[in-house]
Image (cartoon, helix red, strand yellow):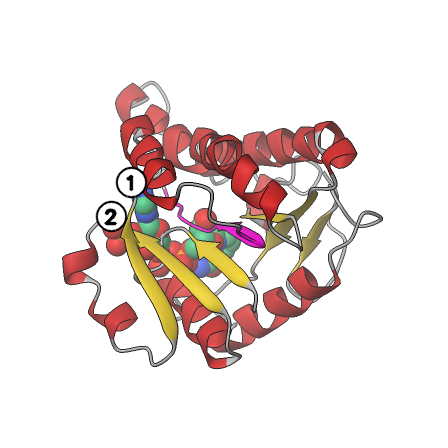
């Protein structure tokens, strides 16, 4: 039995991860800010434990860790993310920028460090973070400040963790899900959420020491940093 923890699991890509992993018989720890309102998660048939987690709140992460105790976790998926208001010349909303960095860049590291002991007890030892192609500096179109910067930052942090934790046997996946039909991606996005998650699950299944710390999309295309 594989135990998988997913952040931001109440809608979008996170909810689809919970559905697909539960359907294959995994033990799913589905984390979200408001479990009482997580109707989509409660409707899933399978082993789904819904737990409260605001990834941007260190006290919430600590409370989750306390509740989990020493539970072995095989795969941790940092999925929760936010888009951000685009930059306007001469009018940067500092609080909005920092809020986006808090959730997209700092929180995945916070969750990873808090749950490292649980990963160490798991058999797979896989840490996965959903980033974006928009985090690629090499491919930057210039149109998505500060969202792109939050994802470039998390790419760097996860790349470093892959190096730092290789000695512990933890492997790190840094995956772009495609442009996906969710609240964030919008209804005009070309990729269906079920197809994105099917691809991401394949990427997670094949994640190993050789691939750890590389930046790829859901169809296994390597992306330039
Ligand atoms: N959709 C795309 O085209 C696309 C493309 C590239 C990358 N991504 C990345 O893929 C991931 C999932 O995106 P999505 O399309 O599924 O987005 P989404 O539909 O907007 O869902 C975002 C999820 O993150 C959760 N979340 C946001 N802030 C949180 C916080 N502080 N604590 C806990 N959960 C929080 C939301 O919970 P609430 O319901 O409580 O707000 C929601 O469950 C994100 O990291 C995103 O950046 C998406």
* Circle 1 residue: 54
In the picture, measured across the screen, residue 184 lies left or right of residue 173, that is left
Q: Residue reaching furthest left?
A: 36
Compared with 178, 128 (above or below) is above
Magenta-highlighted residues = 73-83
Badge 2 residue CB within 8 Å of ligand 1: yes
- Quarter of the picture containing the C terminus is top right
CA gap, disc 1 to disc 2? Answer: 5 Å
Q: Residue reaching furthest right?
A: 210
Check whether the beta carbons of the residues at disc 1 and disc 2 lie within 8 A of each other: yes
Compared with 121, 63 (above or below) is above
**Residue 21: x and y, percent?**
50, 72
Q: Nearer the viewer, residue 225 or 11?
A: 11
Residue 2 quadrant? bottom right
* Circle 2 residue: 33
Q: Is residue 208 visible?
A: yes
- Examine the residues drawn in magenta and state their main secondary structure: loop
Q: Which mark is residue 32?
A: none
- Residue at (81% x, 47% y) in the render: 209
- Residue at (75% x, 63% y) in the render: 206
């Amino acid at each position: 039995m594989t135990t998988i923890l997913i952040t931001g699991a109440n809608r979008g890509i996170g909810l689809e991860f919970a559905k697909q992993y539960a359907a294959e018989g995994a033990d799913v720890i589905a984390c979200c800010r408001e479990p009482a309102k997580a109707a989509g998660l409660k409707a899933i048939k399978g082993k789904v434990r819904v737990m409260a987690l605001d990834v941007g709140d260190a006290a919430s992460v600590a409370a989750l860790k306390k509740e989990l105790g020493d539970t072995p976790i095989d795969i941790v998926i940092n999925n929760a993310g936010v888009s951000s208001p685009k930059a306007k010349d001469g009018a940067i909303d500092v609080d909005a920028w920092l809020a986006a960095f808090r959730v997209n860049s700092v929180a995945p590291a916070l969750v990873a460090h808090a749950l490292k002991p649980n990963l160490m007890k798991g058999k797979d030892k896989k840490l996965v973070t959903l980033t974006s192609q928009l985090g690629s500096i090499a491919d930057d179109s210039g149109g998505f400040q500060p969202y792109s910067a939050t994802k470039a930052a998390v790419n760097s942090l996860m790349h470093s963790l892959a190096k730092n934790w290789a000695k512990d046997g933890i492997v790190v996946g840094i995956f772009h899900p495609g442009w996906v039909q969710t609240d964030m991606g919008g209804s005009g996005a070309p990729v269906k959420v079920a197809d994105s998650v099917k691809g991401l699950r394949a990427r997670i299944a094949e994640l190993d020491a050789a691939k750890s710390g590389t930046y790829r999309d859901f169809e296994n295309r390597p992306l330039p940093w």
